[in-house]
Image (cartoon, helix red, strand yellow):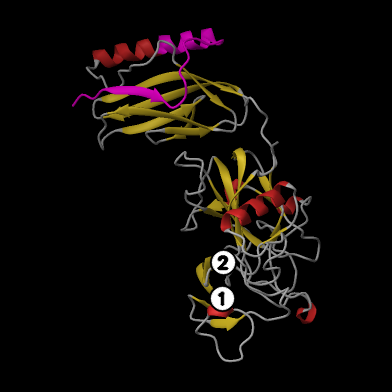
Amino acid sequence: MKKSLVLLSAMVWLAGCSSEDEVEQAEKVNEEAEKVDEENEMDSLKRDFPDAEFASGVARQWFRLAPQLESSSEDSYLWLLNGKEISTDKECVHVFAAAGNHVLTFIVTNAEGLSERHFIVQIDEPAQAHGSWTNRVYEFVRAPGQFANTFPVIPPRSTYESVLKTVEDTMLSRELISLGGYGGYIVMGFDHTVVNGPGNDFVVHGNAFYGWAEPGVVEVSWDANGNGLSDDPWYEIAGSEYNAPTALHNYALTYYKPATDTGREVGAKGVRWTDNQGRTGYTPEETADMIGWPRWLGDTLVVGGSIYERSGLSAFAFGYADNWPNDDALAQIDIDWAVDKNGKPANLKGIDFVRVYTGVFSFSAGEDGIFGEISTEVTGAEDLSL
């Protein structure tokens, strides 16, 4: 069965380029490939685009090249970048760390044989330099507990939109944002894609110091659907505690607003909670200013993910936020540590979004609990390559 292929791109195809020799070479290779296809009566890779086999992109932004063809389940695909395999998907999605020219090869194999096409990809630096610091807050949920309406201060009658604006302004000022008790979280984004390069790639800044850690779980995501929103799958950074015997994954906890909680016991203090392990309890009540219900939340709050146990204020070995001082290499994170929901390596090429949530459910930090609740604090995240 013969099939026709039209190679299109979300990028702008150029009529010419500065790398004339490279383009000419690609054209000659493609002409020879077409002759082989014709001799084998194979038209799987006939094309319809401008004469120059040339595409452009921008460094640290997703490059996408999507062939449109009448395919079958027998087809297999291979993309090579400078001779190295980068994808076996039908669509090529890649991120380049720096400007430069590259040779991109697309190979289709089916029952009729094998055919390939070559392209020169020119990657430019962005018109405006990218910033190393996160520049947007997409979501924010503070869990009940310490500093329920402070760090930053949330005025009465605030809407969720106004809360996001307040938190984003706080992050841009690199000031402290408290996530509250277990499960409280923030979703932050960069103005570019953080490329998964050699070694550690980014760090989430908090206010930890030696002997004082309030670990937050870090999750990462990339803009897989290309809509610029943080609505794609999340991958947990598998830190030192991920496989600990006491670690719980797929954990869920529900908080109940005291003023409307019909399940409260008479005389109970604090915020009632239940979890998917069949447990229930109340957060300690210290003072109205320290333990409370965030003003903009509804009557219940469901949070979850992974939950870890720790003693005192000692830090976990690696892989968490608000765990080691910001300038310590142990605070840095390698994107290669990201795993999927089954604990398998995610093999991400880069990330666009970072989610951090308080990963410990404890109200007795320090000797005799004098420091109160464990609550992760962050000020933002930083791309270490810029």
- What residue does disc 2 label? 297
Residue at the (27%, 25%) spot, across then down: 113
Q: Position of residue 70 (x, y in %)?
A: 25, 29
Q: Compared to 352, does 251 lie above or below?
A: below
| Of callouts 2 and 1, the N-terminal one | 1
Numbered circle sitting on residue 310: none
102 relative to 292 in the view: left or right? left
Residue at the (66%, 33%) spot, across then down: 130
CA–CA distance between discs 2 and 1?
A: 9 Å
Q: Compared to 248, does 24 lie above or below?
A: above
Residue at the (30%, 18%) spot, across then down: 46
Residue at the (58%, 83%) spot, across then down: 281
For badge 2, the amino acid type reads Leu
47 relative to 277 in the view: left or right? left
Name the residue at the front extreme.
Answer: 157
- What residue does disc 1 label? 257
Q: Nearer the viewer, residue 83 or 141?
A: 141
Region of the chain picked out in magenta, as a range = 1-29
